[in-house]
Image (cartoon, rainbow, N blue to C red):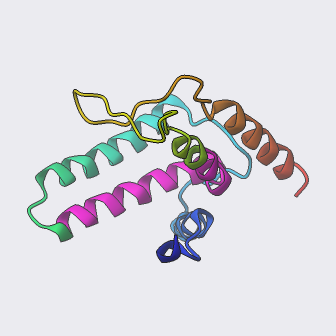
Amino acid sequence: MKYLEGLEMNNAYIQVRDFHEKFNAPIATTPTMLDKERLETRISWVEEELQELRDAKTVVDQADAVIDGLYFLIGTLVEMGVEPERLFQIVQDANMAKLWPDGKAHFRESDNKIMKPAGWIAPEPQLEKEIERQTKASKHI
């Protein structure tokens, strides 16, 4: 997509990691699960932004809430030591494979969510391989 040319998930990740460094927030150097307490804290911050999104009165308010939510979610990846770009591409590729044999998307009636066709391949095995790659790479730094 031309309008996204040059946009990289890891660019946002690096910027949020810079924020963490500057303000002494946690940063993991290898893929790591967050402990329950820290995870719940980060979830509460994201939920706060979702509530702001629900309460938004303008497009600016909505955009601000969404960007703040993204910032917190990317910060969670920073604290986990997980770089998002390849993971995002894996999920994107899986989502783009949701076309049905008739070449169209099929939608769930209740909420219009795009449904997965028979034979659709979930991204988790590839995500696991990428996390393993990142873990190995972090041990060679």
Let me know if residue 64 is in the magenta part: yes
Instruction: Give the farthest residue toward the right.
Output: 140
- Dominant SS of magenta comes to helix
Instruction: Give the farthest residue toward the top.
Output: 118
Residue in front for this viewpoint, 111 or 33 = 111
Percent across and percent down for residue 113 are 32, 36
Reply above or below: 66 against 50: below
| 86 horizontally vs 15: left or right | right
Quadrant containing the C terminus is bottom right
Percent across and percent down for residue 57 are 8, 62
Reply above or below: 75 against 7: above
Query: What residue is at 41 percent from the left and 39 percent from the top?
Result: 105
Query: What residue is at 53 percent from the left and 65 percent from the top?
Result: 16
Q: Which residues are magenta?
A: 61-90
| 22 horizontally vs 37: left or right | right
Instruction: Give the farthest residue toward the front.
Output: 102
**Total number of numbered labels?**
0
Residue in front for this viewpoint, 17 or 86 = 86
Let me know if residue 140 is in the magenta part: no
Percent across and percent down for residue 112 are 27, 36
Query: What residue is at 27 percent from the left and 52 percent from the top?
Result: 49
Q: Quadrant of residue 61?
A: bottom left
Percent across and percent down for residue 30 are 74, 47
Query: What residue is at 21 percent from the left and 61 percent from the top?
Result: 62
